Image: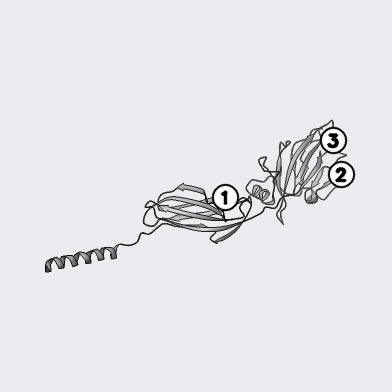
Amino acid sequence: MKLKATAAILAALTLVAFHACKKDPVPPVIFVTPSSLFIEVTEGTPFEFDVSAQKGDANLRQIQIFQKPIDGVTSKLLDTLVSGSQADFFWIHAFTGEHPEVVLTFKVIDQDGYDSETARRVYVEGATALVESTGHMLYSKYSTTGSNAFNIENLESYFLANNPDTLSVDLIELDGSDDGELSNQLTSWSGIRFVRNNAFNYPEATVESAEATYLSSTALQVLSNIAIDDILVTEYDTVNHAYAVIKITGISTAAGSDEDRYEFNVKK
């Protein structure tokens, strides 16, 4: 009997020692920048998150991103497979004004099924619509009757023969010879530059969408092969960072240079 009791005690002590030595599993971790729990974004403007995940005991398997509008239904925005001990990537998302306040949850899962997550509350502000001005005309550089220079800030046309201040000339034709034909090249004397993006959403143009388009593209001081329906985006005030969008609505040619002109609308 004593031997049986001793064996039972040893077995119990062994079981206790086993559980005492067994450590809890270490789950993976996920980090997101911006690290602030509250983020303000502008409707329609792409916003960038820096996502980084690290393994715990097991290698990584999956990263997911969920969106839940306040009093709304959760939806999955991203579900991507990863591997190894670490994963790093940028996730860019443009929030709509449909949901002015959402909670984003970033989740990482490892090969053993353990997971961890972090959340961000995002407040979506309405975008600032640009105001349209229509019916502008820019005549040939060699026209002796029409206004052949244009200032975007004041939406004002000038006649080159009156020697306007060059810094006020934001838009002018670049043409090396008076051959009676439009060159279909536009430039500026004020030094501003232009981005041509005919996929730009001109009807719903906003300050934010114009800025995003301009900054994400290579701006040029001379644009060639100007055609009807071309959309030009420019930073016309580089101090205050003001943007405008120009849409070419017509190109007219006639005998000589006097009536040759570009017709356009401006949103600013």
**76 sits to left or right of 209:** left
Q: Nearer the viewer, mark 2 or mark 3?
A: 3
The residue lying furthest to the top in this view is: 255
Of residues 220 and 50, the one nearer the viewer is 50
The secondary structure type at the circle numbered 1 is: strand
Identify the residue position indicated by label 1 in the image: 93
Which amino acid, by three-letter code, is at mark 3? Glu
The secondary structure type at the circle numbered 2 is: helix
* CA neighbours of label 1 inside 10 A, class few (<14), some (14 to 19), many (20+): few
Q: Give me the residue at 51% from left, 55% from top.
A: 105
**134 sits to left or right of 50:** right
Q: Give me the residue at 47% from left, 57% from top.
A: 117
Identify the residue position indicated by label 3 in the image: 259
Residue 185 image point, x, y percent: 74, 38
Q: Give me the residue at 87% from left, 44% from top.
A: 161
Q: Earlier in the sequence, mark 1 or mark 3?
A: 1
Label ID, residue 172: none
Q: Give me the residue at 12% from left, 69% from top.
A: 2
Of residues 117 and 152, the one nearer the viewer is 117
Q: Earlier in the sequence, mark 1 or mark 2?
A: 1
Q: Earlier in the sequence, mark 2 or mark 3?
A: 2
Which amino acid, by three-letter code, is at mark 1? His
Which amino acid, by three-letter code, is at mark 2? Ala
Taking 132 as reference, is 3 above or below it?
below
* CA neighbours of label 2 inside 10 A, class few (<14), some (14 to 19), many (20+): few
The secondary structure type at the circle numbered 3 is: loop
Residue 132 image point, x, y percent: 76, 47
Write down the quadrant of residue 39 in the picture.
bottom right
Identify the residue position indicated by label 2 in the image: 161
Taking 89 as reference, is 36 above or below it?
below
